[in-house]
Image: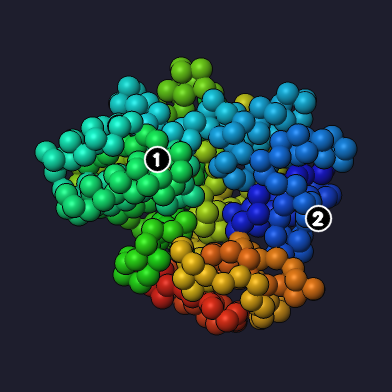
Amino acid sequence: MKVLIVGSGGREHAIAAKVAQSKKVTKIYCAPGNAGIASIAECVNIGPMEFDKLTAFAKEKAIDLTVIGMDDPLVGGVVDAFEAEGLRVFGPRKNAAIIEGSKAFSKDLMKKYHVPTAAYETFTNADDALAYLETAKMPIVLKADGLALGKGVLICNNLDEAKAGVKELMVDKHFGSAGDKIVIEEFMTGREVSVLCFSDGKTIKPMTSAQDHKRAKDGDQGLNTGGMGTFSPSPFYTAEMQTFCQKEVFDKTIDAMRQEGRTFKGVLFVGLMLTQEGPKVLEYNARFGDPEAQVVLPRMKNDIIDVFEACIDGTLDQLALEFEDNAAVCVILASDGYPEKYDKGLPITGFENFDGKEGYYCFHAGTKFDNGQIVTNGGRVLGITAKGKDLHEARKNAYEAVGWIDFANKYYRHDIGKDF
């Protein structure tokens, strides 16, 4: 079986590594891939939004299955483009990927079908949003409606911050057209948990839980990022919560999407806040989380090709998802200055330290080859993941492995998974 993976980050490297374990797979391609993915797949210089080129390549190489890793092509309709050419593809269609593509859509869906979430209002006019804030309770959360690389959420502690946030999103267009519409919602307190779920449109099955760290600096300080590290499982997500979420969140969401004529096949990422009133949905994504995939997939026992095919064929109810009884921690090695300004093109050393080390992973995110040398090529450069018998051991192992890699502007948080 020949598999094509679309994307270029740490998530796609984690997917490729899992696909490479399948005995069914004989060849992996990745478009466009990165320097780490190149060790297990043939990287192809096609961008994730070049749908015509992607489908033409899939037909030329007789690709048996394409896996879409990234949000932009999913929201843009890449699955529809592949299906129109009779090609087998894993991921939600455009009309289902809107659950991530529009925060307003997902909030309205939750309200209509009684999925627990924060109270909210939606605005397309900055003056109306500012007027609403005058009587709103602080702190409050502002969300750009569209895709913003995981950074379009502003937590505002007072009215001045909230007004500045509306200006940033709607007037200054810090995230472009993603801020044409915004959602203003109540601030929820509690533990955050991410649950990635496989769905075939009728059945939805959760993977093991994870928790991400979004802020750039230790102690959850600094700017919001795409994620600075994560751990799995979350000790705060109990069996009782899992039972509640299966019935009141996961099943309801998939049923709602089907009733709306937007059957969801693929990975539904559910961001939860464990409030005093119970779990509530923070957000939905329409694909594997990044860096959540880097701790969830290494703990998965199943052949991932079997799961992808069950989702496509509508037979997920016949498959049991299994995960190892252990833990994993991922620490992101970033370029100092991320998520704002940072240097690229800096040589990276130490990859050989991972050779033959079972339970240790170095997932590439922002890397490329430069004259045969692997160099930095992004804000988030590598995801250093390690497993252990429990979270304490996994964390110790991950931070040990962080020291195996070096590059000039290497930066990372020191407290990933510390607070459990």
* Relative to 150, residue 374 above or below: below
Q: What element does badge 2 sit on?
A: strand
Mark 2 or 1: in front is: 1
Which corner quadrant of the image does residue 354 belong to? Answer: bottom right
Q: Residue at x 46, y 71 (%)?
A: 337
Label annotation for residue 179: 1
Query: Which quadrant, please, contains the C terminus?
Result: bottom left
Give the class, few, some or many, for how many residues have Cα within 10 Å of label 1's Cα (few <14, many ≥20).
many
Question: Picture quarter containing residue 309?
Answer: top right
**Mark positioned earlier in the residue sequence (2 or 1):** 2
From the top left corner, tell me how far across and down residue 327 is, in percent.
Answer: 48, 63
Instruction: Read off the residue under disc 2.
Output: 42
In front of the other: 178 or 372: 178
What's the residue at 71%, 55% (across, down)? 33
Can residue 206 be spotted in the picture?
no
- Whether residues under marks 2 and 1 lie with C-beta atoms below 8 angstroms apart, the answer is no
Q: Is residue 294 left or right of residue 165?
A: right
Q: Is residue 27 visible?
A: yes
